[in-house]
Structure formats: structure tokens, C-alpha cells
Amino acid sequence: MADVTTTWTAAPEPVDTPDAIALLRGYLLEIIGRYWGRPGTEEDVDEELADGEDYRLDLLVVARVGGVAVGCAGLNRVDADTVELKRVFVREDRRGQGGGAVLLGAVERAAADLGARSIRLDTRKDLVEARALYARHGYAEVPAFSEGPYADHWFVKRLD
């Protein structure tokens, strides 16, 4: 059993570092696999990243345990008052140990530092663990504010 008392840290990091790239690829492998009902492949990830969309983040926070990168969460600015939460991921071997809360706290502080008054996100219906995490941390489900094949639920949290 993993040591749940291990200290987590989370800090902004450039999106093109080896650790950031590995985490974003891990995120994509998992969500591709869950969506298609089969293990994701490196080729699937390469295809998804062909246009660079998943690396377009205004800010990426990387969570670490013992110096090892184990999770990430990104932000994109929507307007002067709003940021959008993207790419929240914790490696499977570190789930259930508080990493999601650490990441949300770090991105919420970063958003407030940017002057944002609210943070929003959309997520898929099959990502039930993510929806539960957001609800536990004060994100309220709201009517749709975007369209897309992977947006089934929308959440907003006020930061002020």
C-alpha cells in the first residue's frame, strides 16, 4: 500500500518539460482508452497531439511526491475574469491520496493570482471520478457554456 502521508507539492512548470509532456501523454492515454473502451496507444496520443492542441495551456501545474512528477492540471484564460481548467490528471498509482485536491488548490491560487474571479471546466459523462472531485471542492454544475463531442457536464467555481 502506498504511503498516503507523503507530502505532495504542486507548482507551475513549462508545458514542454519532459515531466510535463509525460504527464500530458499519460492523461491522453487514459482518456482515449476510456472513451474507446480499449487501451490507448502511443499512436493514438500522437494523432491527438498532431495539431498541438493539448499542449496549448496558459499555465500548467505539476504535482510531485518525493520529487517525482505524478499529476498535472492546466489553465487557459477565457477572459479577464475567467479561466478554464484543463487536463487534470493524477497517475493511477497515486490516486486516492489527495493529489486531486492539491492540484485544484494550486490552480485555483494561480487563477486568483492572474486576477480571475471564476474558474470553469467541462468534462465527459464517463469521467465520474473527476465530476465527484469537482463537486467535493465547490464546483457547481451549470448549464452548457461550450459545445464539443467530449463536453457533457459543465462546472464553475467562484474564486472571490
Image (cartoon, rainbow, N blue to C red):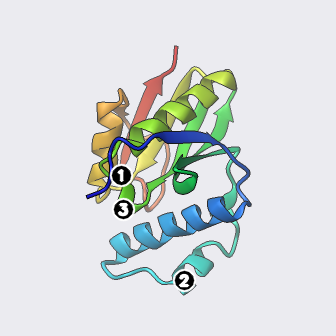
Q: Which residue is mark 2?
A: 42
Residue pictured at 70% horizontal, 70% vertical:
51
Q: Residue shown at 47%/73% (left/top)?
A: 29
Residue 45 placed where, x, y %? Answer: 56, 77
- Horizontal arrangement in the rendering, residue 77 relative to residue 39 (left or right): right
Which residue is disc 3 drawn over?
93
Quarter that holds the N terminus: bottom left
Is disc 1 placed on a helix, strand or loop?
Answer: loop
Nearest to the observer: residue 93 or residue 34: 93
Residue drawn at x 42%, y 53% is 151
Mark closer to the chain start, 2 or 1: 2
What is the count of numbered marks?
A: 3
Q: CA distance from mark 2 to mark 1?
A: 26 Å
Q: Give, as a three-letter code, the residue at label 2.
A: Glu
Task: Identify the disc placed on residue 152.
Answer: 1
Instruction: Estimate the spatial distance between the alpha carbons at disc 2 and disc 3, rounded to whole Å.
Output: 20 Å
Extreme residue toward the top, this view: 160
Give how far across and how far down residue 55 sits, in percent. Answer: 67, 60
Within-10-Å neighbours for mark 1: few <14, some 14–19, many 20+: some
- Disc nearer the start of the sequence (2/3): 2
Q: Are marks 2 and 1 in contact (CB under 8 Å)?
A: no
Q: Secondary structure at mark 3?
A: helix
Mark 2 vs mark 1, foreground winner is 2
> Residue type at mark 3?
Asp
Tell me which amino acid carries mark 1. Answer: Asp
Q: Residues within 10 Å of mark 2 (few under 14, many from 20)?
A: few
| Front tag of 2 and 3 | 3
